[in-house]
Amino acid sequence: MSKPFPIRIKTFLVPLAGVALYYFVQFAALYLCAFIFKDNHSVTLLSAHYGSYLILIALLMAVCLFIWLYTARKTTWITVKKDRLSLDQLLAAVPIALAMLGLVNLYMIGIQFLSEHSLIVKDYLTDYIANTSLPNTTTGLEAAGYYIGVGLLIPVIEEIIFRGIIMGEFLSTMKPDIAVFLAAFVFGTMHMQPVQIVYAFVCGLILGYVYLYSGSLLMSIGLHILFNLLGGILPVIFADNPSLMNAIGFVEIFFILIGALGIRYLRAGYRSKKIQEV
């Protein structure tokens, strides 16, 4: 008979605290941007200074997470998976990241189709496009801030919160599959925008299983960085070349099967390690 997992209030408080902290920092960063750039209109402010906004979020979150993990170094920090990665594990991140983008592409094709038959979906899609088009207006140092924020800093911050802290807490109190699902659910709903919630949840599942199977937060961080570089920065750089982006999109869809094989490979290594530990 398997030993039952403990049920504790901390398991519910940790994800709430993580999400609340992330939202608080976003509002604080927006307030600081408004104060620095003397613009209280959020739309024009973010359109002109989106890069600065992201950098401020990353810096504030870095300070908050350092304090959190330092004060909880004997509890939360020791549960963060930090196994050494092999070269083949690192290489597996590339097709998995492309597969994630392929799934997002298929999802967006479906949303585009549904928007032609549903006013609600059309409104959600319009709102999503408006939000995701903000980086297209950034130039100069603001564009550099966006690239650094989205391509490097934000993935690190989000992986520490959602996989390292939140999923780590779930893993300590429940079975791995449930922990991965709940962490992905929190990650998905945190994005709030209806169109984005669904694919963020799916990406959260993949990131969660990669973190679980690889045994390293660095693996999920690297995967998240690759995903953001290819899905968040390339479309901005090549916004004036839709033909190229469409070609890249088809390549990403092609990689869905290869990415699935990459996750299967990581899973085989995870199971082999578990057997050796018994």
Image (cartoon, rainbow, N blue to C red):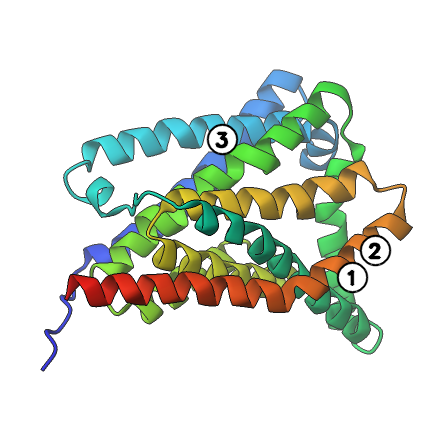
Q: Amino acid at mark 3?
A: Ala
Residue that numbered label 1 is attached to: 250
Seen at 51% across and 41% down, the residue is 155
C-beta proximity under 8 Å, tags 3 and 2: no
Q: Amino acid at mark 1?
A: Phe
Secondary structure, mark 3, is: helix
179 on left or right of 146: left
Q: Amino acid at mark 2?
A: Ala
Residue that numbered label 2 is attached to: 247
Q: Evaluate whether residue 222 shows in this view.
A: yes
Q: Nearer the viewer, residue 126 or 68?
A: 68
Residue that numbered label 3 is attached to: 58
Instruction: Point out residue 91 in the picture as x, y percentages from the top left corner.
Output: 52, 48
For the C terminus, the quadrant is bottom left
Mark toward the start of the polypeptide (3 vs 1):
3
Cα separation between marks 2 and 1: 5 Å
Q: Nearer the viewer, residue 166 or 264?
A: 264
Q: Quadrant of residue 161?
A: top left
Seen at 84% across and 42% down, the residue is 239
Above-or-below relation of 216 to 180:
above
Instruction: Point out residue 222 in the picture as x, y percentages from the top left corner.
Output: 50, 43
